[in-house]
Amino acid sequence: MSVQIIFCVEANSQSESDFMYIKSLLQYRYAFDGSQPKYKPIFMNSKSRYNQQEKAIQKLIKMHERTGPTRVVMCVDEDNDTPDSFALNPAISAYCQKMHYDLVWFRKDIEDVFLHRKVAPKEKNKTAASFALHKGIGNVDLSNLNHKIPLTRNMTSNLITILDPIILENGGRICPTLKQS
């Protein structure tokens, strides 16, 4: 039996940029001796559509229910410099708690966390693809992805804090060449 991890990300399905960063981390950090988790992205097209994905989530859960459990991980940017988007954060937290979803925050956004810089909207896909292709994850300080209390420092996330227990409880391990972060 293998776990399915559904990642709800802000990017759209044409770009897939957010999932490229997450997938790079998954491939870099974790190893498996047996069955590997199934990673399924759901592209929300916007942070504001966080609560409009239930049909897609339930469809993926139903398709996987005979082969193992499913975890849903909502991945959103804090967007503390965009008032309208920032105002959604308490509602997203409450929604994830109500639905028993894991919640990953990127402060200020996913590019700030992985690249330590802003990326223009038109450049996000190209930049993420280059990051994945050239194994940019090897240059990332993984401790910035392992904040127990998210949103307390810029360019940080709780991504590893959320993923480690899911992966380790389901037959995965941290690659031996990596230090614990």
Image: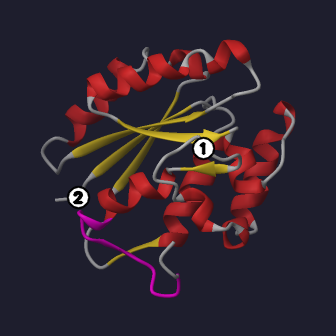
Q: Which mark is residue 2?
A: 2
The quadrant in which the N terminus is found is bottom left
Residue in view at x 23 percent, y 58 percent: 2
At 25% from the left and 70% from the top, the residue drawn is 171
Q: Main secondary structure of the magenta part?
A: loop
The residue closer to the viewer here, 179 or 122, is 179
Above or below residue 21? Residue 65 is above
Residue visible at 60% across and 31% down in the picture: 13
Q: Nearer the viewer, mark 2 or mark 1?
A: 1
Which of the 4 image quadrants contains residue 72?
top left
Which is nearer the eye, 14 or 71? 71
Residue that lies at the very extreme toward the bottom in this rendered image? 177
Q: Position of residue 73 (x, y in %)?
A: 40, 40
Residue that badge 1 annotates: 152
Q: Amino acid at mark 2?
A: Ser
Instruction: Reply yes or no: does residue 93 show up in magenta.
Output: no
3D distance between C-alphas at marks 2 and 1: 34 Å
**Residue at 42% over, 26% down:** 93
The x, y position of residue 15, in whole percent, is 69, 36
Residue 27 disc label: none
Q: Which three-letter amino acid code belongs to the residue tagged 1?
A: Thr
Q: What x and y, as percent, mark residue 142?
A: 60, 66
Q: Is residue 30 above or below residue 66?
A: below
x, y (%) of residue 52? 43, 14
Among the 4 quarters of the image, the one containing residue 175:
bottom left
Q: Secondary structure at mark 1?
A: loop
Q: Which residues are magenta?
A: 168-178
